[in-house]
Image (cartoon, grey):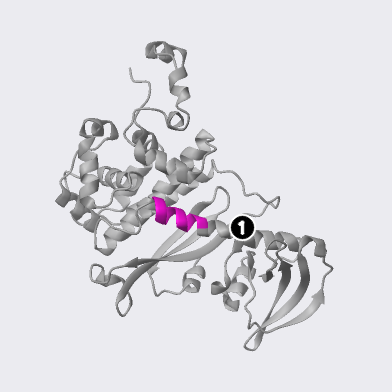
Amino acid sequence: MQSAIIVFAQFLSLVPKSVFAKLSKLHKPKRSPRTFSPWSHFVHLLHAQLAGCKSLRDGIMGMNAASSRLYHLGVKPVPRSTFADANKERPYTLFEALFGELYTRCLSQAPKHKFSIKNRLFSLDASVIDLCLTLFPWAKFRTAKGGIKVHTVIDHNGYLPSVVTVTEAKCHEVNIAKLLNLPKGSIVVFDRGYNDYNWFRQLCKSDVFLVTRLKINARFRVIERNRTDRATGVTSDHIIQVADGEKTLTLRRVGYRDQETGKCFEFLTNHMTLPARTIADIYKERWQIEIFFRFIKQNLKIKSFLGNSKNAVLSQVYVALIAYLLLAYQKFMSKIVISLHYLARLVQRNLFQQCEILDLIDPRRQRLKPNNSSRLSLLN
């Protein structure tokens, strides 16, 4: 009796088969390959992410090399042409919907954000992924350049991507931000590129708080001055009215001087009761979304693609996000103290090893286990 299943199977076990089957029925392609099921397609795409495969051929070779263990994953070896056809034909919306389901499951295990406030905290940003215009003519960005833009909302509970929308690279961030439906009472943090007073009014009406930077050329009038404690780095705390054409909007302006760098910042928010230093600290926490983008670009496959069609690219992007959630999910459940980057590297090198994930981090656990596996099964 085996004492542990392979590492890849432990990740796949986090994906509920019943949920996947339900989503597969809702997102059927017009022409489905008979010998390549949606589950097999997903497993092959996820393998490409976790194993760091450089191409479609590389992914097929990696799976074929472990053909004796594919049965336990519920898949079979597949021809390269069949895999390529599935990338082109099977709707990426299947993996987009699966990403949403797994976010909800992963969030239940995620630690809370580091602030003492009860509000949910989100960061909003977008990142462009450059594409070769010759290979991806549908992704035209500039005259001789292609690209897509990944609009992302990070939930600071566990630093998980909660909402991800992929558009053409020339789509402005604010246009996607206006479509968001954030929880009532939550706080969303973003940089100055999202400054749009009409959207700010929309957030205020939805009882959503914002924290951002004040534009250098912003027109405003101070209507109230609050006391500040300069020992905390806060230099000013004003209630202001900003001008937007003939309309005005009442907001709060917080001045802050970083005691380490000496740089001065001006923040804008519609939350009138939080301590001014907390407003500055919340904006500083926005850096976590930059860390997220850097992680997925360095550790997952979203810069080189297994297919050239729009559907193939979007399928790969959403499976990359699923891979991120599964890595985070394993980290939360196992209470692993190493970084997500180190965990991803360990998994990449041991994807088909037969051991528990904790044994990869601390090999001494494997040596301390009794050899009598049948005895272990009786004790469980």
Front residue of this view, candidates 287 and 269: 287
In the rendered image, residue 305, in percent from the top left (x then y), is placed at 28, 58
Q: Going by the image, does 344 lie left or right of 146?
A: right
Prevailing secondary structure of the magenta residues: helix
In the rendered image, residue 377, in percent from the top left (x then y), is placed at 41, 15
> Which residue occupies 63% across, 80% down?
216
> Which residue occupies 26% across, 68% down?
136
> Which residue occupies 82% across, 70% down?
226
- Magenta segment boundaries in residue numbering: 291-299
Q: Going by the image, does 183 lie left or right of 73?
A: right
In the rendered image, residue 65, in percent from the top left (x then y), is placed at 21, 37
Query: Counting other residues with Cα less than 10 Å from the Cα at mark 1, is it few (<14), some (14-19), or many (20 or more)?
Result: some
Q: Is residue 346 magenta?
A: no
Q: Is residue 374 above or below residue 246?
A: above
Residue that badge 1 annotates = 285
**SS at mark 1?**
loop
Front residue of this view, candidates 60 and 16: 60
Residue 350, picture quadrant: top left
> Which residue occupies 34% across, 20% down?
2
Residue 366 shows up from this direction: yes
Front residue of this view, candidates 157 and 57: 57
Q: Is residue 193 above or below residue 220?
A: above
Pick out the residue farthest to the bottom: 246
Residue 274 shows up from this direction: no
Q: Is residue 284 above or below residue 159?
A: below
Front residue of this view, candidates 185 and 121: 121
Instruction: Say which amino acid is labelled 1.
Output: Glu
Residue 313, picture quadrant: bottom left
Q: Is residue 297 magenta?
A: yes
Q: Going by the image, does 186 lie left or right of 177?
A: right
